[in-house]
Amino acid sequence: MTRRILLFYKYVTIDNVQEVCDWMLATCTGLNLKGRIILATEGINGTLAGSVEATTLFINIMEAHPLFKKIDFKDSEEDGVHDYFPRLRVVVKKEIVRMDVDPQQVTAKDAGKHLTPEQAHKLLATKPEDLVVLDGRNYYEARVGHFEGAVKPEIQYFRQFPEYIDQNLEQFKDKQVFMYCTGGIRCERASAYLKLKGVAKEVYQLKGGIHRYIEKYPQGFFRGKNYVFDDRIEVKVNNDVVGTCDLCQVPYDTYTNCLNASCNKHFIGCPACRKQYAETCSAVCQQLVADGKVPVRPPLRIAKREFCVVE
Ligand SMILES: [Zn+2]
Ligand SMILES: [Zn+2]
């Protein structure tokens, strides 16, 4: 049976967050939905998997709730083979995407100006001299696909983004900064963080993220693949290959995880290298697996990475 995955978020002040959490848990349990939901006083961030009927009902229930109207639900189909969301987790945290910045101090209310895919496309086409295109994602996401000419911060976690901004303020001085991420959730506060520094001339963010832009412009200014946090890992947008194999540096853009389960490195391995190193990330891991000294990951392309609700 085909299952559908819903990705959604909304920045909205939730005063009675624990109460909403209990309600959400009961609602999802009743609909047999699996996945993860993070609630905070600043809003909601969720990834849910379930039947088409259940996910449709969920959308209707949310639309009827005074706090959760007008959410832009993004959906994708599960492949029906892997069960990536065996459980349901609904939790209360400080932030809906961990940035390690007090949500009272940097809120989505201070965010950069939203540009629709059409407006963003126009801006990128006119290429103003003072435009800086800034990727708001982690480096492993940006390296397989990004907007043309984008600055790609070398960070591994979103919570490193504020530090990156602090150390590179000069780069944004008197510039128009156009920021983007996968679905928009990270840019809401990341753009606010940059804006509050008061150095950039203007800060924009892409509404609906890469997800909505490539729907509209598959042959637009986004090159390569869109990295996503579900079982597809990367979604092909156009024929450009912008990544390279971590082992031999040939152009390649498909991630895999090391067969050595205790390593589980998430890396780009071209077919030749994956064959040479027997699905591991290195000669060391290959030897450990061959000697039976380590457990091997299940035969999935991606083995229990942090399947996060980042987006
Ligand atoms: Zn290779
Ligand atoms: Zn390894």
Image (cartoon, rainbow, N blue to C red):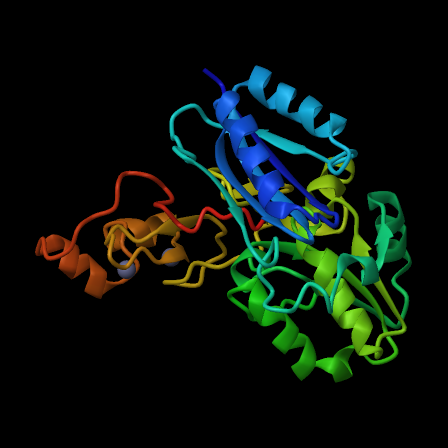
161 in relation to 290, above or below = below
Q: Which corner quadrant of the figure contains ligand 1?
A: bottom left
Q: Residue at x 85, y 52 (%)?
A: 114
Q: Nearer the viewer, residue 103 or 308?
A: 103
Q: Residue at x 57, y 67 (%)?
A: 159
* Residue 275 image position (x, y, % from top left): 27, 49
* Residue 78 image position (x, y, % from top left): 49, 28
- Whether residue 236 is visible: no
* Horizontal side of residue 109 vs 271, given as left or right: right
* Horizontal side of residue 78 vs 95, given as left or right: left
| Image quadrant containing the N terminus | top left
Q: Quadrant of residue 56?
A: top right
Q: Residue at x 68, y 63 (%)?
A: 103
* Horizontal side of residue 262 vs 18, given as left or right: left
Q: Nearer the viewer, residue 195 or 298?
A: 195
Report the residue that reaches farthest toward the left.
Answer: 291
Q: Residue at x 59, y 59 (%)?
A: 94
Q: Nearer the viewer, residue 269 or 298?
A: 298
* Horizontal side of residue 281 vs 133, given as left or right: left
- Whether residue 151 is visible: yes
* Residue 45 image position (x, y, % from top left): 62, 45
194 in relation to 44, above or below = below
47 in relation to 172, above or below = above
* Residue 274 image position (x, y, % from top left): 31, 51
> How many numbered circles are shown?
0
